[in-house]
Amino acid sequence: MSLALDALIVFVGCTHVLLAPYNKVEESFNLHAVHDVLMHGITKLDQYDHFTFPGAVPRTFIGSVLLAWVSYPAILLANSLGFAASKFSLQIIVRLVLSALNALGLCYLRHAVSRRFGRPTGLYFTFITISQFHMPFWMGRTLPNMFALFPVNIASALLLSRSPNSLKPSPTNVYTAIALLTSTAVIFRAELVLLLGPLVLQCLILKYVPFGGVVKLGMIVGLLSTAATMAVDSYFWKTASFPELSGVYFNVFQGKSSEWGISPFWTYFYPMLPKSLLGALPLACLGYVMDSRIREALLPHIVFVGLMSFLGHKEWRFIAYVVPVFNIAAARASRWMVSQRKSTTLGQWCLFGFWFMICVNAVITAVFTMASITNYPGGMALRQFNKAFPPLGPHAKAYHVHISNLAAQTGASLFLQEHSPPFFSFSSQNQIPTYPWTVYDKTENLTLEELSGSLNITHLIAEWSPVEMKSRMRIWRVVDVDE
């Protein structure tokens, strides 16, 4: 039963990857970094994409390099089974690996929940998690937040994993959890300091570990993590680099994150958390009220959301780490509901309420998923172009396709540049044909005259209004339209 529940979490996450295999712009840096590590290795840095499109602030390569290395055996296995026929299939494999890793983190957390609150609670945690949209959908996406999600879930599991009546976790578990959160905050997502602070304060107040031990551990892990990210990222960026410090300075001290929009203070509490948790939110509130162990686990995460609310720019992914813990609270309440005597009216209504919540979650998730599948027009268009216009042969003229800004932001990744080098080398015997390969061009701010002649562009993937399309059809022939 336990193995089946773990497999179900992995399966649902991977299904979301297969249903929506493309990416959005915020995922591009890490996805393209994985592409470059796989295609060029870690020595041919001059061919890396991030020097051409660096983004607003530097990001760490540590997660991308690790994901590429972990994905490598899976790619070789997929190739031996005939499932790695194109570069785009490598993107799917990489995302499947990331989704599976985060799913395993949730499985580890589920085992801790079963130990702390009983196996039925672990069962309901699984049902709640897989019935929601946001966590299964996003945990296979190459965002820094999703790289951070795995160690955060492991830390949460370590703090939970103890017998039901135990008053405190083992010091080893506490120190390991603090070390994981410290390292993750330094390397991947600096906002996790706002979660680490309340958790450490709680551990000190409850006397789980001594103050001196926490300070010593924090200094050692913080310095080692800083040294690691500066060494790795200075190498890949070819200049002294501490990505998360740069991000904090850019977004917080310079206030540049407001350029991407400002939301009201309460946005995380409403509508983002209700949208993420769906029907689990009222059950999480019930679990918080009825069990002191839930209050202990959930309180630092509520404080974290409150602290994050002071930042003007808000996105769901910035607080994604709290969703599994809220689901634990909901699962605890679900156990109480389902355990009521079925011969009573209360017991029957509680049982109905739980399964009704799961069904409503599933219906909403299905709607969100269907909407998300069509939310990547750039990726869909470029994939359609690759199918319709393969290289014609060694003596034919090469295609030159220009990819507009919107297309590049909505799925037209480097993995979809299938008819152009570099290609993944499965062995030293690989022979790359000498075709005139397709030119994939993402040059920005080109004039209509440049698009129409001077750059020898043969195809456009662009967003045009009906009026623009009517006027430009005098020059360009429309091959396909995605409305």
Image (cartoon, rainbow, N blue to C red):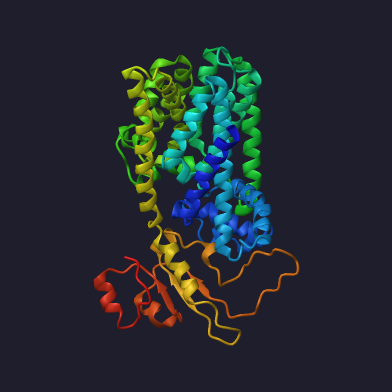
Residue 200 in view of the camera: yes
Q: How many marks?
A: 0
- Left or right of residue 210: residue 327: left
Residue farthest toward the bottom in the current orientation of the protein: 395
* Residue 419 percent coordinates (x, y): 56, 72
- Toward the viewer: 16 or 295? 16
What residue is rendered at 35% in x and 80% in y? Answer: 476
- Toward the viewer: 402 or 92? 92
What residue is rendered at 52% in x and 74% in y? Answer: 439
Q: Quadrant of the C terminus?
A: bottom left
User: Residue 227 falls in which quadrant of the image?
Assistant: top right
* Residue 17 percent coordinates (x, y): 50, 51
- Toward the viewer: 237 or 416? 416
What residue is rendered at 34% in x and 17% in y? Answer: 344
Establish if 110 lies above or below 215: below
Establish if 214 lies above or below 84: above
* Residue 28 percent coordinates (x, y): 50, 55
Residue 443 in view of the camera: no
What residue is rendered at 40% in x and 32% in y? Answer: 308
Residue farthest toward the right in the current orientation of the protein: 428
Establish if 293 lies above or below 439: above
User: Residue 115 falls in which quadrant of the image?
Assistant: top right
- Left or right of residue 68: residue 345: left
Q: Quadrant of the N terminus?
A: top right
* Residue 356 percent coordinates (x, y): 34, 33
Establish if 467 lies above or below 18: below
Residue farthest toward the front in the current orientation of the protein: 343
